[in-house]
Amino acid sequence: MADPCEDADRKLTEERLALLSVLQELTVAALDLFDPSKPADAFMDRVAERLGCMVALWVQVNARGQVVLLGASGLSAASRQLPIPARAEPGGKQAPVEVNLPFPELELPGLVRWSTPIIGTDAAHSASALLMYFDREPHLPRQYRGMVERLGGVLRTALMHRQLFTRILDSERALHQQKTLLESLSEASDEGILISTQEGRTLTHNRRLVQMWGLEEELLSASYEAWVLAAAELVEEPARFTARASFFIEHSDASGHDELRLKDGRIFEQYDAPVVSADGLYYGRAVYFRDVTARRRTERDLQHERDFSSAVLDTARALVIVLDAEGRIVRFNRACQEMTGYSFEELRGTRFWKQLQAPEEVARVERDFAQLSAGQGHEQYESCWLTRAGERRLISWSSNVLRSPTGAVEYIIGIGIDITEQRRAEQERDQTFLREQQARARAEEQEGRSAFLSEASGLLAGSLAPEDALRNVVALTVQRFADWCTVDLLDNDQSPQRIAVAQSQTLRARCPAKAAPAPPDLNATHGPGRVLRRGEPEFFLEGYGSAAPGCGVLEFQSWLSVPLLARGRTLGALTLARLDGGSRYGLAELTLAQELARRAAMAVDNARLYQEAQQAIGLRDEFLSVASHELKTPVTSLQLSVQGLLRRARSGALRTASTETVTHSVEGIERQAMRMAKLVNTLLDVSRIHAGRLELELEEVDLAALVRDIAARFAPELALSGTTLRVHADTPMPGIWDRSRLDQIVTNLLSNALKYGEGKPIEIQVGGDARTALLEVRDQGIGIPAEQQALIFRAFERAVSSRHYGGLGLGLHIVSQLVERLGGAVRVQSEAGRGATFTVALPRSGPAAPLPAPADMHLDANHA
């Protein structure tokens, strides 16, 4: 009876042998998988049949993460078209056994899936898997799984060969494509190309090579050296050609360039280079030939044209500069070099504005050039260049651009003319023209001023009344040179009076309600008052705007005030002002105003002199009349007395006349003679005073004693007129004076009081202090009006008519002059109808220096 264990072992062994037989069979069948052109479905059908599975699948996850079905058994054609989602990541070490496959055949109930991973060998580690689905669990699963794993190894090997074979086929196709492309490029090239192996065998050549050299292709089939020897017969330097070929054969890594001249006149460029793979393997040599005959001819023609252009540019006197689009200098003709002092080689390639442009123009020139290089900007402009020596030259440029075939600006050509001298001449001409215009304007202005002065002089000379003439001149001045004009004159007591005022229409429109300003203040620090006080001009000319002092609240842009001077005296002031809208005054207007003021002063002075002359003539006539009357009276009395004596003498009555009668007649004659002598002496004194010939005989004189003596001498006249004289001169008052002139002063004052005192009492008083002696004569007569008090000390002047009061009108004038000569002063205090008081102050030390007018001096008990 058989052993059951042995039977089991034998059966297991048989099954293993059967599995090995199946595995061997499938391994042999897998050899067909090495060819990628053969599908894997037949192999998968064989697997399903031999292993008894319902569905067998060979899937792969490629480098992009996509699941690809390499082979299948048990799937319908429709299932094969379904998309397969992949859950496994590509490139992992484990097979994607968890792939969710959407095939309906795999949804049958009870299917058992077996899978085995197949790790790829490519660079991306792509993975695949063998999936088998059974309708039941296979018998002896452990051995079965081992056989399946071995089958996976067979598939892995098949997959590796399949991928390798695929790469080989891809490389062959790529190589074929590259060769085809190379041949196409070689044939399309205008260069002759010859490629030889390292051993010197011709590998390939193009049709252009044959056309260029005209040699038979059989030479190329023979060897590279044979072709070189044949080609050497065509060049002008065959030895050099063959030596070059030998050099490059011996030095496989060398490369070089040369130019060949053929005997038929053609010119070839030759370039030798090794053919080396990407990994550095040397395969052979390549020789390239290019026919440059036409190019060399063109270059020669271009060079000739360039030389011709250069000669033309260098001959031209115009400045020619060629710049590239960046502003770098590419041409710089001889005229530019001569003008700047720089050679072309020094400036080649430099940006012109950095070397040649004036510093202040660099920024502008850069901006303009940027616009010009962009095809915009000005084609005509001027700029300043600096030479090597630092000289500035003004250039007038005309620019043009050269564009490439694409329309981009390639070059900018600038043609310039040095206009430095021309501009300098133009500037000099303009300056000359300007000077001529200015001279003409000055001449016209001077002519206008002369005409103005002439017209003003005519107005001034046309009237003997200065006020009327000045008003006309002021109005004329406002029409020509001012918006405001005034004339202020000093009267006899040096008080300012505004004689004339004129305003322009502009000023009247601006301030129509403004009243004329008051006369100027002599104590003012500015303006006409200061000019009147100091006799010097004052002005604010160009560039200064201020209110004009002395002109109210009016605001003026500039003004000037000049004095009216005549014979060293200030007669008045002429003031001109302009508003802010007009032109400012300058020195010319100041000169004009001074000349106008001079003429106005002359006119005023002449008018005053004329008035004074008229007054003098009137006074002279009156004086002659009075003097004639004054002289006629004593002369008549003297004549009557003499005639009476003559009649008595002729009739003999004189012998019988008593002594008393004769004496009375002779005394009358003496009185009239003394009266005439007094009149003559008075006239002589006035003449001496005015001529400056009055001499003083100084001595010590007691004023009080002198007054008492004179009072005694006046006793007869006082008695005759019934006038009482009270003398207060008890205290001696000695001083250094001229006795006769001091007597004359007291006599004239006492005579004046007696004449105008109307018989009322007269007081004469002497007083003073240690330095000054005071004499005061007071009457109670008709008095002197205030407006006449300044006149009574003038020659031939009197406060009343000479018709009612006799005399020459010289007494008080002589008093004032004598007092002044003695260093003293005299004043009068009076009111009409209330008498007059004359006060004389004399320095007791003599006439060393004049005393001020005794305005506040008077005698009281302390002086007496």
Image (cartoon, grey):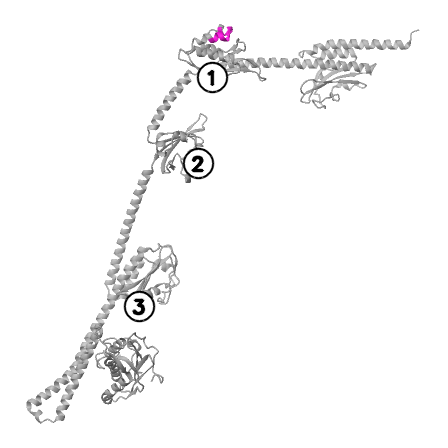
The residue labelled by disc 1 is 257
Work out whether residue 792 can be spotted.
no
Q: Nearer the viewer, mark 2 or mark 1?
A: 1
Q: Nearer the viewer, mark 2 or mark 3?
A: 2
Please, what secondary structure does the residue beneath circle 2 have?
helix
What stretch of residues is rendered in magenta? 219-228
Query: Residue 321 location in percent, x, y?
Result: 38, 31
Secondary structure of the magenta portion, mostly?
A: helix
Q: Is residue 510 magenta?
A: no
Q: Horizontal placement of 591 versus 162: left or right?
A: left
Which one is earlier in the sequence, the residue at label 3 or at label 1? Answer: 1
Q: Mark 2 touching mark 3, by CB under 8 A?
A: no
Please, what secondary structure does the residue beneath circle 3 have?
strand
Query: Residue 358 location in percent, x, y?
Result: 40, 38
How packed mark 2 is, by other alpha carbons closer than 10 Å (few <14, some 14-19, many 20 or more), is: some
The residue labelled by disc 2 is 366
Q: Amino acid at mark 3?
A: Leu
Can you tell which quarter of the image residue 127 is in? top right
Up the image or down, 803 lies above or below 354; here it is below
Can you tell which quarter of the image residue 169 is in? top right
Q: Horizontal placement of 546 versus 802: left or right?
A: right
Look at 26% across and 58% down and name the residue there.
Answer: 453
Up the image or down, 693 lies above or below 27; here it is below
Q: Amino acid at mark 2?
A: Glu
Work out whether residue 140 can be spotted.
yes
The residue labelled by disc 3 is 490
Q: Nearer the viewer, mark 3 or mark 1?
A: 1
Q: Amino acid at mark 1?
A: His
How packed mark 1 is, by other alpha carbons closer than 10 Å (few <14, some 14-19, many 20 or more), is: few
Which one is earlier in the sequence, the residue at label 2 or at label 3? Answer: 2
Quadrant location of the C terminus in the rendered image: bottom left
